[in-house]
Amino acid sequence: MAPLRCSMAAEASMALVFSCLFVCVSSNASCAASAFTWSAGTIPIRSSPSGRRVRLLLTAGNDKYASDFVPPVPVPPWYSDPTILRDRSHVTPADRGFDYRGAEEGGEGGEGDYTLTLSPTLSDLLARSTSRVVPFQNGRVFVKKRARPIDNNTEKEVVEPLFLSYKECDASWFGSGGTISWLGGGESDEDDDVLDYFAVDIPSNMDAESLFQDGQDCTIESAAVRNYGDAMPSRRHAALLATANGLFTFHSSHSYCSKCGSPTKQIKAGSARKCSSDSCGASIYPRIDPAVIMLVTSPCRKYALLGRKKSWPSGRYSTLAGFVEVGETLEECVARETLEESGVKVDSASICFSASQPWPFPRSMMLGYHATATLPSSSSDDLPPISIDPAELEDVRWFSKDYVRTHGLVKGRGSSALDFEPDEMEAEFHVPGPASLARVLITEWVRG
């Protein structure tokens, strides 16, 4: 272990216990964040709700996982793809039973001239060679997993959706009890065709697993979309599966009309539902819950406030977040949620928008912010004190930029999956994977 170099001024005697975890306890301890240094950088500090305990995570200078390289993150954030075509006019008819389709440039109608044609039936559209269907069942998506070589000695596991043609699907999937939604369109990687992507939610009473066989170089499996986000190399695939996950959550929770209790049916290519009662006929659209996610840094910008939930995999720490409440602005939500979860106040003038991300797990829209904490006038510490609400989070700490850079933002480490199994080092500390907006915010801070 590299030698520990530290100096400390405390108002009372303290007991020191250290291995990988260094704990100092005092009835009235005042530990300056800058007082502790280690060969890999400054040690992060966490204050308990009582303010009487300061816990320090040590980092070793010869840490085999330490790296000065901060890997890039997806921009725009994952689960979004601006190249996906969202216009569904060719999939669902307009109110008059028609959709508008443009004539080919230079054709009989001439440029800018449009003709009215009847919209094709859903089965006709699905049967086209340019249609692809992604199977889901019980909230799980079927995917192909394969090993992709990175170099001579290393392979990386990647995930691809199980895109099927209509002929490869079982006709019973689209019968009574099945749900199908159009996800969007996009240009084919192989030719100039525009593909239509659909997702089918196979009825739960059907044995779908037995229909899929492993290939020579891949295995077929199913799990929640969120568990695959970091392992999908394609932005489009991630965005399509996230869209399907959100739509199927909506359909499964709105089988009956909230106004009259009558059954509902899907309309508009699976993007909405409608009450089947002639006397009601209410239209129902997916609910999207806005939530802020914020990286709060210390006044000196050298430390970031990260927390964790008890249900998360061991060692995972992330940015604070919370849902927007009635009557408040997004910026007000940033300040309120930070105070509720950590007891830290933020400077309202410092709140700055960074990016947004669809997060349909099950139906959120994440709005990312940076903000700076304020020091209480009575505080003599370098870092604002933390007061945790155990009903909100299990733990909240101040982490130094050096520590996060060398332990959290190492390429290939960390995950956004809820079933992630961390290794020994990740079980001490890791941040969400590249699929999360939290990783984007953290990376922006470390690189700044």
Image (cartoon, rainbow, N blue to C red):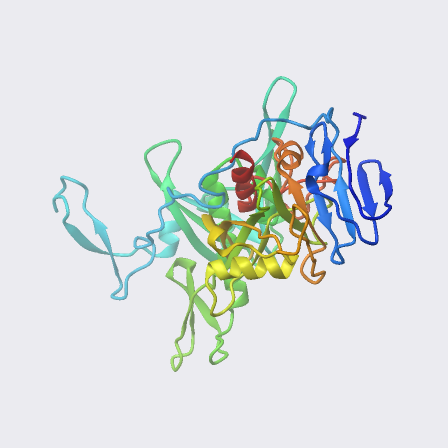
Q: Is residue 19 above or below residue 258?
A: above
Q: Identify the image quadrant of residue 386.
A: bottom right
Q: Is residue 107 above or below residue 183?
A: above
Q: Which of these two is toward me, 286 or 410? A: 410
Name which residue lies at 68% across and 45% down. 316
Question: In which quadrant of the rendered image does the N terminus lie?
Answer: top right
Q: Identify the image quadrant of residue 66.
A: top right
Which residue appears farthest toward the top when viewing the image? 152
* Residue 170 spot, x, y in % from top left: 52, 50
Residue 400 visible in the shown view: yes
Label total for image: 0
Please indicate whether residue 94 sits to the left or right of residue 435 in the image: left
* Residue 434 spot, x, y in % from top left: 56, 39
Please indicate whether residue 260 sits to the left or right of residue 85 in the image: right
Residue 363 visible in the shown view: no
Name which residue lies at 49% across and 51% down. 350
Q: Is residue 425 above or below residue 282?
A: above
* Residue 17 spot, x, y in % from top left: 86, 40
Name which residue lies at 67% across and 60% down. 392
* Residue 74 spot, x, y in % from top left: 49, 38
Q: Which of these two is toward me, 30 or 170? A: 30
Name which residue lies at 42% across and 43% down. 81
Q: Which of these two is toward me, 98 or 404? A: 404
